[in-house]
Amino acid sequence: METMRRVVLIASAALLFLPVAMKSRTSQDTADRTAFRALSSCMVTVKVSGKLHHPGIYVVSANTLAESVIKMAGPLRPLKQHMNGTVAALPLLNGSAVNLLDQPDGSLLLVVDQMTVSERMILGIPLDITTMGEADFERLPGIGPALARRITTYRHKNGGILRLGDLIAVDGIGEKKYKMMRHYF
């Protein structure tokens, strides 16, 4: 009988200890996932187009050069040395648009620009409030032509610089509209 009580006591203790052990194990898994997310934040999303076998959207390391992305996308013909080396050596930013164009003299022109506001919104890439024009602001939900004009006018009157927090000072942007807009930037 005494042996049976000990077995029941040990089994009960084990059942009480099991949830604690599982909970601490879950915490470790969460910490690992968090660390993984931090590593993945060093990635950028770029659009690659032009004379390529595989144009499209690429997620690459933040230090990737424009020429490297072109090589990954597979140019339709071999890259020549007189391709603009300065642009080819640019590190890409999140939302960059890389385009490989044929020139009349047979050379290739590498152009690095930004994706359109619509593309950035679809891909969840933050917008740059300092470079957006009226038409770009109009693409945001709840922003019409008049409000877009007021935003760009406000930015112009303040030296061409606009911080996200400054939007609340623009006539027609209240707290509700500001909260809706801020997640795009």
Image: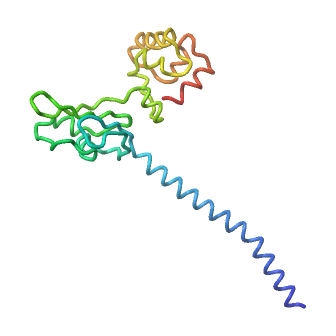
145, 89: nearer the viewer: 145
Determine whether, in the image, residue 64 is placed left or right of residue 103. right
Q: Residue furthest right?
A: 1
Image quadrant assignment for residue 83: top left
Q: Position of residue 46 (x, y in %)?
A: 35, 38
Residue 33 lies, with reference to residue 108, above or below; the image says below
Q: Position of residue 160 (x, y in %)?
A: 38, 16
**Measuring 15% from the left and 44% from the top, which residue is drawn there?**
78
**Measuring 42% from the left and 13% from the top, which residue is drawn there?**
158
Tally the numbered discs. Answer: 0
86, 84: nearer the viewer: 84
Check the picture and name the quadrant holding the N terminus.
bottom right
Residue 149 lies, with reference to residue 2, above or below; the image says above
90, 115: nearer the viewer: 115
The colour scheme used here is: rainbow
Determine whether, in the image, residue 54 is placed left or right of residue 134. left
Determine whether, in the image, residue 67 is placed left or right of residue 150. left
**Measuring 40% from the left and 20% from the top, which residue is drawn there?**
132
**Measuring 53% from the left and 53% from the top, which residue is drawn there?**
34
Q: Position of residue 3 (x, y in %)?
A: 85, 90
134, 57: nearer the viewer: 57
Q: Position of residue 85 (x, y in %)?
A: 16, 37
